[in-house]
Amino acid sequence: MKKILKICVLSFAVLLLLNNDIDAQKDFDGIRGTQHWMMYSDAPNSLYRYIAGQAYQDIDRRNETVSKISSLSGWQQRQKWIQKTLQESVGNFPPKTPLNAKITKSFDEGDYRLENIVYESQPGYYVTAGLFIPMGVKEEAKIPAIIYCSGHTDKGYRGYQNIIINLVKKGFIVFAFDPIGQGERLQYYNAETNKSKFPWPSYEHSYAGAQLFVTGNNLARNFIWDGIRAVDYLLTRKEVDPKRIGITGRSGGGTQSAYIAAFDERIKAAAPENYITNFTRLFESMGPQDAEQNFLYQIKRGLDMADLLEVRAPKPLLMLTTSRDMFPIQGALETKKEVDRIYNAYGKPENFQMVMDDAPHASTKKNRESMYAFFERVFNHPGDSADLNVKPQSSEELQVTKTGQVCTALNSETAFSLNYKDAEREMHQLDINRKSMPQYLNVIVQSAKKLSGFTEPAPIENTIFAGRIQREGYVIEKYLVKGEGNYMIPYLLLKPNERGNKAVIYLNPDGKAADIAVGGEMEWFAQNGVTVLAPDIIGTGELGPGVFRGDSYIDSVSYNLWFAAMDIGRSIVGIQAGDVIKLTNIVKNDLHFKEIYGVAKNQMSPLLLHAAAFDKDIQKVALISPYSSYRSIVLNEHYDPHFIQSTVAGSIGVYDLPDLAGSLAPKKLLLTGVTDGDGNTGNSKDINRDLSVIKAAYKFKSEENKLQILPAIAGKELNDAFKNWLKNN
């Protein structure tokens, strides 16, 4: 009994300490603290709401343009615009090279034959596939073929055998292939588990896909190109009627089938399932999806899901939907209403239809039978459209490669390795540009503003005073100020009793209160007469990360949120930079400081570099444990996901963090504990490659003494480094 009582007392004590910590933390909250501001109670979701709000504006402009189309010629002009804009957003496809297709195994299943096939959509980039051919088909018969695209399952097309075998039993040739990161095409293979290092295919897609976006590429382009090459392969088969090629797929396969059909006119009929909605409803509900479901700047360019369908009109098209799908059915209904208009303008309303079953995100008997009947009708291939019970193939029969993975059996290229080559080419050009001092430094700052989606901050509105905490030698004041959007930035202001003439903007990825403890780094500045402004930048602290995670929440980082910013032509770091400059203006204009410095930790370092490069009022910069460059993230197969939200799409080859750092000269710059893109300090060759760019810029301006690069330090050593950095020399 005494033992139980002792445990209860200890448990209560621990709980009391935790509650005390929580209460103490609230002391430094500006929005949800002791003065609880209900008006801003949704603050943690500020970043998603702001990005979504901008997306809605772009979508509204797009919808207004479409609403004015009133003739067939108007729609045909729109189709040309869609073709051009889709290609710009996806980028140019690689040249067509030999497929080098091989049949690795073949099985006679009685009423159909299975051929396991591997082909190269790009040199050394292997695609595993299965060709299902109805038995008794003669080469001269020329029957219709359906390309089947798989959704997000680690089994690839092997998880969709019911649909595939039903189609082949109805007399269609079916060609099904593994998407990137699924089936036998894992990008991040773990030899010990014989599985991916990631738990979900969407992680496989987005982890590599983010690197492609930073390079200015699209993972969607790889997906689409694999499908285009699948059509190329079908056209080598004498059994296939080239005038009767269709495509379908569900969920992620619905995405692929809509994409591939939009880019390849040889596909005569398409039936995407459980994907089509519209971007308005997508942002209002589940948010943007993984990497391959986003094109570069797609919303900013004026694209929506309806464009994927309208560009094909008047070719036969079937939308398969379910009323309780995770992709909002209201968006599908609105898209149908718009697409109806172009098919009516062509005088072919019968070529477009939508089927909806009352079900969740799932394949249903009604939708499957509607799809069978659709292809039978449009390809003049009559038969029974009933969904049959079929016997699935064994995993052994469906294994294409010897080892079950192209990475081990064929040493296949990956999305990363292909992108690596592009990134190296882009970086080579940037290295050439870097030799044109000092012109390139001015150019890269303007490029950074444009690519990051930076906008100059609006004039400061009244700040809200939210409380004061007295400490020995200084006082902590809490404030709120309106950010770039309709959200409030909470910040702490540490005001020394004996104020000096220096102020520091202090940025920590863990929020404004992370270093507020007695004896902490912010206190050191205050006790040395330096005023400190520590904000919760949007996405951090009280302003984040919010409830939106998405399907690619890797290591507690929402890749989908970063994709959302990219979709509207912005970046998270660009939005944040505007807010940092607004805070700098407060220090300058309201607090009347002339010497304004910046300190940033870890993944906040790129933010401070952008802000300091854009704003001359930030006169000194100190970066604690920064990663060295975007290049280091893109060129390392394994990188730290926590860095991704501070990157900028399309920046590789245009500008990089060392360029921004170099542009600061003659500002004093302190770097300690620089890491590579995976957060390691030991990769000296990679890190020194980036540091050499900064050193060259400071040397060119004869300001080498203003640049200090130190190993990782803490405590007194770090304070001593700060003391030297603060000196006016």
Image (cartoon, grey):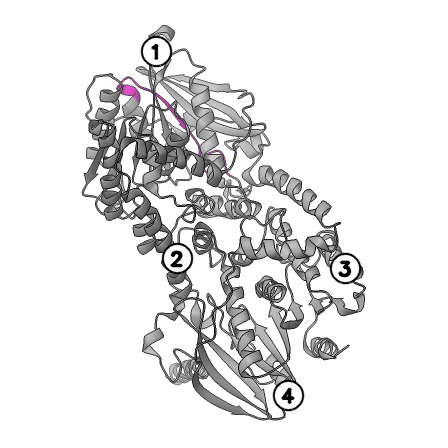
133 up-or-down from 18: above or below: above
Badge 4 amino acid = Gln
Mark 1: secondary structure: loop
Residue 664 falls left or right of residue 417: right
Q: Which mark is residue 467?
A: none
Nearest to N terminus: mark 1 or mark 3: 1
367 up-or-down from 167: above or below: below
Q: Nearer the viewer, mark 2 or mark 3?
A: 2
| Residue 75 vs residue 355, the one in the foreground | 75
Nearest to N terminus: mark 4 or mark 3: 4
The answer to whether residue 179 is magenta is yes
Q: Position of residue 127 (x, y in %)?
A: 49, 29
Pointer 4 and pointer 2: residues touching (CB < 8 Å)? no
Judge the density around disc 1: few (<14), some (14-19), many (≥20) Cα neighbours within 10 Å. Answer: some
Residue bearing the label numbered 3: 695
Which residue range is magenta in the image?
A: 168-186
Q: Which mark is residue 54?
A: 2
Q: Quadrant of residue 615?
A: bottom right
Pointer 1 and pointer 3: residues touching (CB < 8 Å)? no
Badge 1 amino acid = Lys
Q: Which mark is residue 142?
A: 1
Badge 2 amino acid = Gln
Q: Quadrant of residue 54?
A: bottom left
Badge 3 amino acid = Lys
Nearest to N terminus: mark 4 or mark 2: 2
The total number of labels drawn is 4
Mark 2: secondary structure: helix
Q: Position of residue 380 (x, y in %)?
A: 24, 16
Alpha carbon of mark 4 to alpha carbon of mark 3: how far? 32 Å
